Amino acid sequence: MLRQQWLAEGRVDVPPEAIDAGLWEEVAAEADRCEQYAVVRHNQRPGLLTMRDGSITSPQRCRVHPGGPAVNALARSKGLADVAAEATGHRRMTAIRMGLKYYSPGDYMHVHRDDGKCEITFSCGMTANLGPMGWLPNLRWLSTDQVVERLAGTPYPDGGDQFPIGYRTLAGFDGSRAPHWRTPLGALSREVLLTICFTDLTV
């Protein structure tokens, strides 16, 4: 079922039972503790920059922290690795990148593609009522050059789709292929986003 959803839609919902419920409390407490140590990530280079691994970087502003033992435990959990493997069809999936993003009013993330090593990117909110992720799954199979040609000068493309970011509910999406973005956060908001990227060790 997960495999079919991944192939058809480029995203999958992680079954709640795949993650120990008590682990969410530990991750939430850790996210609160880490916030004061988060560093500013502010890439101001205009436009889209293509990388050799096929990823596309673009301007963004937020604060970031890699997380601690609780985030690491979530990323290394067997349940999440099993979902990553079933969805992508790869046997030896392992987390290679994880962390917390803290969005304050006005923070943003222009359209981009994730690191080319990321076979699947999981995300969820550690605060409730996060705004949706904008993305363009119809451009999933285009080359990097084709994506840049289509999206140059459009930080938040018109006509894109959206998918919700659940609260303490992970969803995986094809972030290294489908361009995606987050529009500037509202004036009275504060959001914490958790992300975990998996790669295939058999390659």
Image (spheres, rainbow, N blue to C red):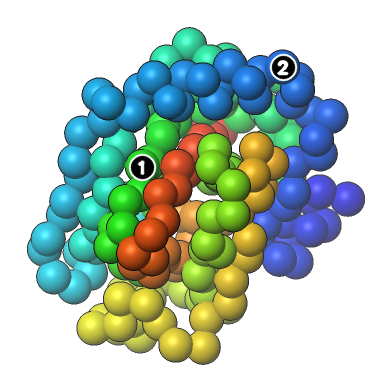
Left or right: residue 58 compared with residue 137: left
Q: Can you see residue 72?
A: no
Q: Does 129 appear above or below 136?
A: above
Could you say where residue 92 lies in the image, as x and y percent from the top left? Answer: 64, 26
Residue occupying image coordinates x 69% and y 41%:
169
Residue behind mark 2: 22
Tell me which amino acid carries mark 2: Gly
Q: Does 163 appear above or below 65?
A: below
Residue occupying image coordinates x 54% and y 55%:
130
Q: Looking at the image, tell me whether mark 2 or mark 1 is earlier in sequence order.
A: 2
Q: Can you see residue 188?
A: yes
> Front-most of 152 and 20?
20
- Which corner quadrant of the image does residue 24 belong to? top right
Q: Does 127 appear above or below 39?
A: below
Badge 1 crowding class, 10 Å Cα cut-off, few under 14, some 14 to 19, many 20 or more, is many
> Front-most of 202 and 74?
74
Furthest-top residue in this view? 69
> Front-most of 197 and 27?
27
Residue behind mark 1: 102
Furthest-right residue in this view? 1
- Label annotation for residue 19: none
Tell me which amino acid carries mark 1: Tyr
Q: How many marks?
A: 2
Left or right: residue 145 compared with residue 189: left
Left or right: residue 52 compared with residue 179: left
Could you say where residue 116 lies in the image, as x and y percent from the top left? Answer: 40, 48
